[in-house]
Image (cartoon, grey):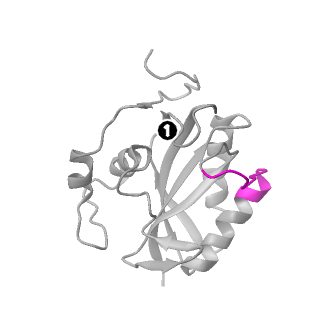
Amino acid sequence: MSQTAYISIGSNLGNPHQQVLAGLAKLGLIEATRVVVSSPWYLSLPMGPKDQPNYINGVAKIFTQLNPGQLLTALQKIEDTHGRVRSQRWGPRTLDLDILLYGCQVIDKEHLKIPHHGLKTRNFVLIPLADIAPKLVLPDGISLDSLLEVCSPEGIVPLASGDISDTIGQ
């Protein structure tokens, strides 16, 4: 049986625009998984150390027959093929793929937390998620609309199709 899942996609190294596009394409190549829709891309300030390039972020909605653990493994394999190095928390990365939501499941394991622990507070996740699922309600009953009401749009700008500039606020 297929489950709906939402995956965040981000990059700030190694031609981020190409990285996120390739990452999105590879989501559709995961066994028993289909990309349903993806958000527009956004340029956002880095969340962690400020001495790194800005990010390009988006969100994809997928249907998958994989369980959450299998899906996480598949996402990490894609990251690895893109040269992802996990050396610094919130540090720069070639490709970052995170499971935001998996159906209505709540999972709290050491290496897998669903809903994603930063989902409710990160504008670079909430805003693109709202583009593709504006009426979404989280497993705890909180609506995406209510989260957006308290989410600052500061530091995030939509990218026009084909725009790969690395500036915010110009």
Residue at x 79% of width, y 50% of height: 83
Residue 106's spot in the image, x, y percent? Answer: 40, 78
Image quarter of residue 31: bottom right
Residue 42's spot in the image, x, y percent? Answer: 47, 36
Q: Quadrant of the C terminus?
A: top left
Q: Extreme top residue here? A: 170
Residue at x 47% of width, y 27% of height: 160
- In this view, the residue in front, 122 or 77, is 122
- In this view, the residue in front, 29 or 100, is 100
Residue at x 31% of width, y 73% of height: 139
In the image, taking residue 94 as reference, residue 140 lies left or right, namely: left
State whether residue 169 is above or below residue 3: above
User: Disc 1 residue type?
Assistant: Trp
Residue at x 79% of width, y 56% of height: 81
State whether residue 119 is above or below residue 64: above
Main SS of the magenta part reads loop
State whether residue 128 is above or below residue 43: below
> What residue does disc 1 label?
41
Indicate the secondary structure of the residue bearing disc 1: loop
Q: Is residue 83 magenta?
A: yes
Q: Is residue 168 visible?
A: yes
- In this view, the residue in front, 15 or 167, is 167
Q: Extreme bottom residue here? A: 1
Residue 80's spot in the image, x, y percent? Answer: 76, 58
Q: Is residue 26 magenta?
A: no
> What is the span of residues highlighted in magenta in the rendered image?
79-89
Q: Is residue 32 visible?
A: no
Residue 146's spot in the image, x, y percent? Answer: 20, 54
